[in-house]
Structure formats: C-alpha cells, structure tokens
Amino acid sequence: MKLDSLRQVPGLVAAVLVGEDGLTIECIGEGSEALAAELASLRTSIARVSDRMGAGRVTRLAFTSERMEIVAMASGDYVLGSAIQRGIDTRPAQQALARLALEIVDLPAGEA
C-alpha cells in the first residue's frame, strides 16, 4: 500500500490518497474517510481561488486547528494528505508526502 510509509510518522492521526474525482483510493487512521472527502472538496475550492487570481496550480496546502495540523499535497490527479496531532513537528509528514507525491505523479489512472 502506498501510505504504509506514513504509519511511522510521529503523531499521525490519519493519512489519505484521493483521486481527482474525489474518491478515496487509500486511507489509514481514525477519521481518514472524512479527511479524504474534505481534502477533495478543498482542492476544488482552492483551485478556483488560485485560478481567479492567476496563481497557478496549488500543489501544497497546510492548516492548523485546535487539535491537529493538516498537510496535503497535490500530485498529478491525486491528493495526498495527513492529519498530525497538534504540537508534533510536521516535517517528517511533509517529507514522506513529498516522496509519495513523486511516486504517484506518473501513475496511469487506476494504478495508485
């Protein structure tokens, strides 16, 4: 499974791989289905803002809530995302997501 390398990330709550169509390809952790659905929706919304501003394609998104930090990366037709416990360094998650993004960018549809 593509997301197995994320299981070792400190503080990982959930991780997801979502297709451009919004369907979950793979997920791990508590709340991962909700994370997948919302990241797919956010990608669409943020792409609209980026297009209207002429900013180009969004490739990375990160935000912090009271309990978690969410980091997501777009790679080709896919979105990879992780939810990390707040207060834990997100760099290991960011690095793992970046490595996975490189692996999946060239996959034909349906092979992620």
Image (spheres, rainbow, N blue to C red):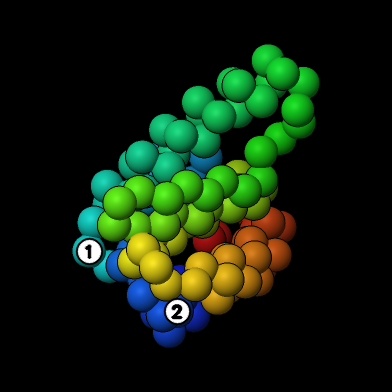
Residue in the picture at 22% in, 64% down = 30
109 or 77: nearer the viewer: 77
Q: Which residue is mark 2?
A: 9
Expressed as whole percent of the image width and height from the top left, the position of residue 112 reads 53, 61
Residue that extends furthest to the left in the rendered view of this protein: 30
Question: 29 left or right of 25?
Answer: left
Expressed as whole percent of the image width and height from the top left, the position of residue 94 reads 58, 66
Rendering quarter of residue 27: bottom left
Residue in the picture at 62% in, 71% down = 95
Residue that extends furthest to the bottom in the rendered view of this protein: 8
| Amino acid under disc 2 | Val
82 or 106: nearer the viewer: 82
Label 2: how many Cα within 10 Å (few below 14, some 14–19, many 20+): many
Q: Could you tell me which quadrant the N terminus lies in?
A: bottom left
| Amino acid under disc 1 | Glu
Residue that extends furthest to the top in the rendered view of this protein: 52
Question: 32 left or right of 84?
Answer: left
**How far, Cα to Cα, is label 1 from label 2?**
15 Å
Rendering quarter of residue 82: bottom left
Residue in the picture at 36% in, 72% down = 12
Label 1: how many Cα within 10 Å (few below 14, some 14–19, many 20+): few
Q: Which residue is mark 1?
A: 30
As helix, strand or loop, the secondary structure at mark 2 comes to loop
Q: Which mark is residue 69?
A: none
